[in-house]
Image (cartoon, grey):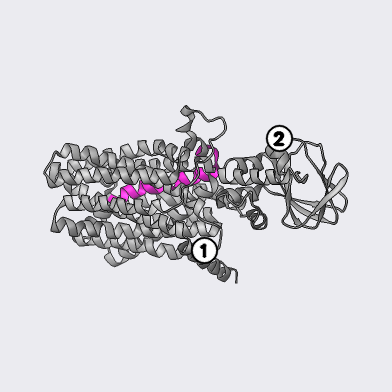
Amino acid sequence: MRTLGGMVESLRAFGAVFRNPNLRRLQLAGAGSTLGTWAYGVAIAVYAYHAGGAKAVGILYAVRWGIGAVAAPWFAVLADRTSRRRTMLAADLVRFALLTGIAVLAFADGSWIVVFVLAVAATAASSAFHPAEAALLPSLVETPEELTAANAVMNSISSIGMFLGPALAGVLLAASGTGAVFAMTAATFVWSALFLIRIPADSQPEPVEGSTRGGEIVAGFRAIASTGPLRLVVGITATQMLVTGALEVLIVVLALRVLHGGNGAVGWLNTAMGVGCLIGVVVVAALVGRKRLAGDLAFGAVVFGAPIALAAVWSNLGFAVVLFALIGIGTTVVDVAGMTLMQRSAEEAVLARVFGVLESAILGTLAVGALLAPLLVAGLGPRGALIATGVVIPAVVVLALPALRRVDDTARIAEEPLELLRKLPLFAPLPPTVLERLAAAAVELHMQPMAGIITQGARGDWFYVIRSGRATVEVDGAETGELGPGDFFGEIALLRDVPRTATVRALEPLDLYGLERDDFLAAVTGHAPSRAAADSIVAARLPAGAAL
């Protein structure tokens, strides 16, 4: 019954994603960006090959990935300090301009050096899009389950783009040439921008207290270094991308030298992996109800890595196709679980920078993996290289298993205080991930009848919300009102840094949730809409003498 309930909850979450108009717009914008990126990758490789052969392709890809890895953390600062939506829009418009220039040069047989420079600049601009997208998404969902489902849908779009982008590029290359693909790619970035414009402007996150210009760039690195779940996700994802980079080379080696399947086998294995990525969305839907993201991350990593090693054992194309479908499933589970865990673990103010560090790690480890693969083949042979590559991630998961279990044990969602806090007007504007952390910090309190909770004139250190029971409010010894389930008090002394303006006593057995000063202020003052709502409540209560 628990499994069935989890599946029903998952289906509701996926339904909510498709009913949410702003999430749909973000997903469609991501579809345009992904489609263009994959089509452009095929065309620029073909263009580089004709310009300077395989060596030119390798150099261009190394420079593109390297520059992207360096640029991602810097652009992520822009997303955190201004607006995630505007950062994505800027990335789209810059890429449109660059790809239009590349298309013109390709049609006119212009300088290939200029094309390469523009291509590197386009990759750098792309590195700004995905961290901002990942940081914006949590503000558009309403529940933890919806966040996971939204990430799964985004991953599905990426998988479809992985098919459709190269397919469209192939058709246009055959019919017209690289210039047509570059022009089409420019159009996909316009598509993305048009959907982003329709998403309401997001508010600028409040700066981290004590931050300096020099510290802005390292804030994402510092957040990851100090947060266990973030360290785990970045470490496992970087390892996965290292293996993925190697697999880009080894898939050709497997098809030609182990399976002896010819060029067609390369296509079949890539297709199987893409189909597996889509099947992985169904697997994610089944796992959402478990609410054990670290365990899902470990499961996906093993499913991704182990089949690579197994592919070296049997020289059978049909078996290899099944194994590569499993690799695709593992890829989706790792991507969705890892992204969701990062969104729930990172502070709102540095969220884009955390994803900027991840983007940098992804691009850097992809390049390293691609460079290591030929060395492994030369030293261990094709089968040995596959086995050595495939066992890396399972070995890392085994070593990280105690830490992964601790993350899941401490990351359970405090559902009752979460539902209670979500209904309060000063918390309603907060992103779901911030509300989750606030609910986890809530302390359950029990008061006997006539017990005092706060005293007029005392220092205010806590905020309270009533779970059950009734309380009386007294100002200068006179009763001024009663509070019941769902009512809250204690916010004014915290927000205005003044002594308590009233006394609150329990009239009957009273159950409350309390939030300490630092947790309350960090959540409310760190998010502009929530701060505005809190200020309105303070202004409304003070004249009436009901301020607490």
Answer above or below: position of 309 versus 527: below
Is residue 303 in sight in this rendering?
Answer: no
Query: In the image, which is nearer the foreground, mark 1 or mark 2?
Result: 2
Is residue 364 in sight in this rendering?
Answer: yes
Q: Position of residue 344 (x, y in %)?
A: 54, 49
Element under disc 1: helix
Give the amino acid at mark 2. Answer: Asp
Q: Residue at x 37, y 52 (%)?
A: 390
Q: Is residue 424 magenta?
A: no
Q: Is residue 246 magenta?
A: yes
Judge the density around disc 1: few (<14), some (14-19), many (≥20) Cα neighbours within 10 Å: many
**Quadrant in which the N terminus is drawn:** bottom right
Q: Which mark is residue 115?
A: none
Q: Position of residue 169 (x, y in %)?
A: 22, 56
Residue nearest the viewer, comparing 401 with 232: 232
Q: Residue at x 54, y 69 (%)?
A: 8
Of the image marks 1 and 2, the number of the one nearer the N terminus = 1
Stretch in magenta: 224-248
Q: Residue at x 44, y 41 (%)?
A: 79
Element under disc 2: loop
Q: Position of residue 218 (x, y in %)?
A: 47, 33
- Residue that badge 1 annotates: 13
Give how far apart the Cα atoms at labels 1 and 2 are. Answer: 40 Å
**Quadrant in which the C terminus is drawn:** top right
Give the amino acid at mark 1. Answer: Ala
Residue nearest the viewer, comparing 7 with 259: 7
Q: Main secondary structure of the magenta part?
A: helix
Q: Position of residue 231 (x, y in %)?
A: 50, 42
Q: Which image quadrant is residue 198 in?
A: bottom left
In the rendered view, does 467 fall on the left or right side of 51? Answer: right
Most distant residue in the front direction:
543
Q: Which mark is residue 497?
A: 2
